[in-house]
């Protein structure tokens, strides 16, 4: 039986960090075993909010290509591609824009939310309003059944389903499956200062950080602020280091650490030492692959360019059906 298809992508707006890895990439790697996966670098999407400063976009595409492969995305199992290398996405977006009511785009919650969040730039643009439609085109181009997303993106998938229904109704066809969200559980991942890990807070551990840099960052990470001296008992429940233990350390060791913290029988450096050991162990394959691709910088891009050719063949088949249905 043919495998069901999955599509997902990330914008090239900077280097990827552990939050991106645990919140998405690690899950994508697992999904490769069960599904027919298409993963892409959404460089046109980066322009919908970052159109005014594109000087670094190509550089970020290269970095993300390396991050994808370092994380374990495998071109023998998945199709890995770059959105702008498959221009059919623009054609499908254009055709869908003809039949999409403005009101449907305006009521998508992220439209207003992101305009509030990104006040430093003018997002009263045609491209920004239409980015969920570009996303719908990305998904249905490959007839994806599932889209792994966080809860905040579910409205976009529902919108893509509406677009599919409208297209089918108008052109009396059944070309596309209605995509479904595949909810990804995102572990709580604190940044180095205890706030949510985010590039905008400058508190992240990058996938490109060497094992040495990772060790240094964890050693300087904020702890329970009430634990000023080694002899002060601490509270793991309010300590961001312990949140990372929840992700990386086995249950038994975590309990020992919690007990040691509460009784001050271990110090924060001991506690961080255990965490660093587990993190390094978990990330070792990623670090090894990253060291390889960093030493062979063109290899990752070549993989993505070859993947884009494969994606384009699928996209061209879909567009032949779409043109036939729309009579253009
Ligand atoms: S011992 Fe560990 S959990 Fe306790 S305050 Fe220090 S770093 Fe945090």
Image (spheres, helix red, strand yellow):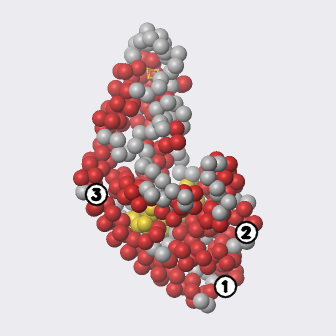
Q: Are marks 1 and 3 in contact (CB under 8 Å)?
A: no
Quarter occupied by the N terminus? bottom left
Residue shown at the point (61%, 90%) measured from the top left: 327
Instruction: Report which residue position mark 1 lands on.
Output: 171
Relative horizontal placement of residue 279, taking residue 19 as reference (left or right): left
Report whether residue 155 is seen: no
Marks 1, 3: nearer the viewer: 3
N-terminal of the two: label 1 or label 3? 1
Relative horizontal placement of residue 164, taking residue 88 as reference (left or right): right
Q: Position of residue 159 (x, y in %)?
A: 66, 65
Q: CA distance from mark 1 to mark 3?
A: 46 Å
Q: Is residue 225 above or below residue 154?
A: above
* Nearer to us in this view, 206 or 311: 206
Instruction: Report which residue position mark 2 lands on.
Output: 102
Instruction: Report which residue position mark 3 lands on.
Output: 297
Ligand 1 positioned in quadrant: top left
Q: CA distance from mark 2 to mark 3?
A: 43 Å
N-terminal of the two: label 2 or label 3? 2
Q: Position of residue 148 (x, y in %)?
A: 52, 57
């Amino acid at each position: 039986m043919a495998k069901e298809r999955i599509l997902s992508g990330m914008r090239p707006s900077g280097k990827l960090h552990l939050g991106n890895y645990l919140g998405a990439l690690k899950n994508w790697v697992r999904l490769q075993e069960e599904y027919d996966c298409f993963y892409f670098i959404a460089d046109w999407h980066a322009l919908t909010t970052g159109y005014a400063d594109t000087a670094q976009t190509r550089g970020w595409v290269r970095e993300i290509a390396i991050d994808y492969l370092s994380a374990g995305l495998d071109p023998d199992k998945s199709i890995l591609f770059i959105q702008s290398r498959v221009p059919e996405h623009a054609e499908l977006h254009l055709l869908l824009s003809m039949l999409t009511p403005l009101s449907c785009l305006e009521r998508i919650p992220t439209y207003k939310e992101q305009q509030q969040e990104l006040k430093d730039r003018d997002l009263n643009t045609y491209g920004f309003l239409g980015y969920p439609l570009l996303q719908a085109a990305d998904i249905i181009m490959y007839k994806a059944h599932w889209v792994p997303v966080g809860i905040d993106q579910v409205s976009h998938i529902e919108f893509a389903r509406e677009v599919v229904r409208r297209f089918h109704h108008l052109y009396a066809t059944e070309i596309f499956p209605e995509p479904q969200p595949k909810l990804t559980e995102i572990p709580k991942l604190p940044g180095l200062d205890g706030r949510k890990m985010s590039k905008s807070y400058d508190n992240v551990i990058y996938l490109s950080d060497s094992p040495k840099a990772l060790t240094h960052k964890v050693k300087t990470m904020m702890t329970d602020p009430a634990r000023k001296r080694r002899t002060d008992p601490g509270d793991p429940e309010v300590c961001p280091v312990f949140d990372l233990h929840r992700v990386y350390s086995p249950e038994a060791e975590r309990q020992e650490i919690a007990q040691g913290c509460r009784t001050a029988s271990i110090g924060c450096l001991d506690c961080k030492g255990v965490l660093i050991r587990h993190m390094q162990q978990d990330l070792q394959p990623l670090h090894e692959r990253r060291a390889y691709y960093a030493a062979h910088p063109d290899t990752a891009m070549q993989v993505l360019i070859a993947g884009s050719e494969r994606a384009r063949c699928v996209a061209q088949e879909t567009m032949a059906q779409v043109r036939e249905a729309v009579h253009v």
